[in-house]
Image: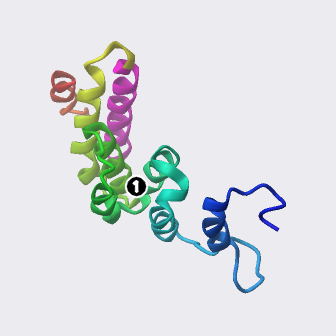
């Protein structure tokens, strides 16, 4: 059937693994960690250019796989790593753990004209987060953030 649908032979094992085994609706890997492991196993079929964007979207949900990603000689830039770790901490509601990653990311992005808007949005988000937790308090850390960015 996959041949008739035009599925490349190298990608057929990946597609077969994605199909449900018990006839139920939904894909076999139900969690981001399982899906990332599946993609890493089928790296050759996807190619690095196909795997990289998918893995970068899944890494915040499975930060414990950062080393496995690096072991495949798929290095992460400092920006990609800080973004993945910041998002991973945010997903776990660990805002204090996310903050240093966001600040490094904002500083790195702010060095180029193209990244300055993204850096400003990160700083705005951090300020909003502080205001959410202490609505009457002034964000005393903002001057330090701006000096670093």
Residue shown at the point (69%, 83%) measured from the top left: 21
Q: Which residue is mark 1?
A: 60
Q: Which residues are magenta?
A: 115-137
Q: Magenta stretch containing residue 52, yes or no?
A: no
Q: Position of residue 19 (x, y in %)?
A: 70, 73
Q: Does residue 51 show up?
A: no
Against 89, residue 41 (above or below) is: below
- Is residue 16 toward the left or the right of residue 114 in the image? right
- Image point 44% across, 63% down: which residue? 40
Is residue 128 in view? yes
The picture places residue 65, in percent across and down from the top left corner, at 34, 63
Q: Between residue 60 and residue 121, name the one nearer to us.
A: 60
| Quadrant of the frame with the N terminus | bottom right
Residue at image x 51%, y 68%? 38
Q: Nearer the viewer, residue 36 or 8?
A: 8
The extreme bottom residue here reads 22
Q: Position of residue 104 (x, y in %)?
A: 22, 36
Few, some or many residues within 10 Å of mark 1 (<14, 14–19, 20+): many
Q: Give the position of the C terminus as an image quadrant.
A: top left
């Amino acid at each position: 059937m996959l041949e008739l649908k035009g599925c490349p032979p190298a990608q057929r094992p990946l597609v077969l693994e994605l199909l449900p085994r018990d006839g139920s609706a939904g894909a076999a890997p139900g969690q981001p960690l399982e899906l990332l492991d599946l993609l890493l196993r089928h790296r050759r079929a996807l190619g690095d250019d196909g795997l990289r964007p998918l893995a970068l979207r899944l890494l915040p949900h499975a930060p414990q796989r950062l080393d496995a990603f690096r072991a495949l000689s798929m290095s992460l830039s400092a920006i990609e790593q800080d973004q993945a770790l910041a998002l991973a901490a945010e997903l776990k509601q660990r805002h204090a753990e996310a903050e240093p990653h966001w600040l490094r990311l904002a500083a790195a992005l702010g060095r180029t004209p193209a990244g300055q808007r993204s850096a400003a949005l990160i700083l705005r988000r951090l300020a909003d987060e502080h205001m959410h937790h202490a609505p009457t308090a002034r964000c005393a850390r903002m001057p330090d953030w701006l000096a670093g960015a």
